[in-house]
Image (cartoon, rainbow, N blue to C red):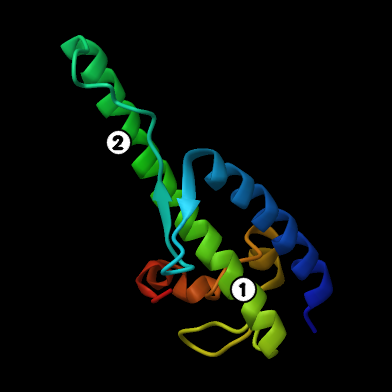
Amino acid sequence: MIDTQKYKTQLEELLAELTADLTEIGIHDPKNTENWIETTKDLGTSNADPLDVADRTEEWDERKATVAVLETRYNNITHALANIEAGTYGVCEIGGEEIETDRLDANPAARTCKAHIEEEANLPN
C-alpha cells in the first residue's frame, strides 16, 4: 500500500518550490493553467550596442528553455496531486501496474513503473 500522504506532502513542497522558481522567470498563462510564459527584461534594442542586444537575446533564449523544463515538472507534479485526489496515484499510466516505491521515492511525480520509464515522456499532460 502506497503512503499517499507522504508523497502528497513531498509533491506540495516541490510544487511550491517550482512555482517560486517559475514566477522569477515567467508568468502563469491565464488562458491555460498548464502553460507558463517566460518574461523578459526590456531588450532596449532601439539604441543599444549590438553585443548587448545579442547578450539579452541569448538570456531570453535561456529563460525560454528553463521555463519549458520547469513547466514540464510543474505539470507532472500537479498531475500527480490530481491522481492522489482521484485515488489513482502510484498506478502506471501505461501498463496499469503499481509504480515501485523506490521509483516514487526518487520521483514522486513519476507516471510510469520502471518497465515503462522510457515511454513516460510520450504521455500527454
Placement of the C terminus among the 4 image quadrants = bottom left
Of 4 and 64, nearer the camera is 64
Give the quarter of the figure containing the N terminus. bottom right
Per the image, the residue denoted by label 2 is: 61
Q: CA distance from mark 1 to mark 2?
A: 29 Å
Give 34 or 75, whichever is nearer the viewer.
34
Which residue sits at x=41%, y=69%? 31
Q: What residue is rendered at 58% in x and 88% in y?
A: 97
In percent of width and height, residue 116 lies at 45, 75
**In the rendered image of this protein, does residue 125 appear above or below residue 13?**
below
Q: Amino acid at mark 1?
A: Ala
Residue that label 1 marks: 80
Extreme residue toward the front, this view: 46
Q: Residues within 10 Å of mark 1 (few under 14, many from 20)?
A: many
Amino acid on which the number 2 mark rests in the picture: Asp
Q: Position of residue 3 (x, y in %)?
A: 82, 76
Q: Position of residue 103 (x, y in %)?
A: 63, 65
Q: Earlier in the sequence, mark 1 or mark 2?
A: 2
Q: Secondary structure at mark 2?
A: helix
- Residue under the point 60% across and 65% down: 77
Question: Label 2: how many residues lie within 10 Å, few (<14), some (14-19) or many (20+)?
Answer: some
- Compared to residue 17, the image places residue 46 above or below, namely above
Q: Is residue 15 above or below residue 99?
A: above
Q: Quadrant of residue 47?
A: top left
Across and down, in percent, residue 34 comes to: 46, 67
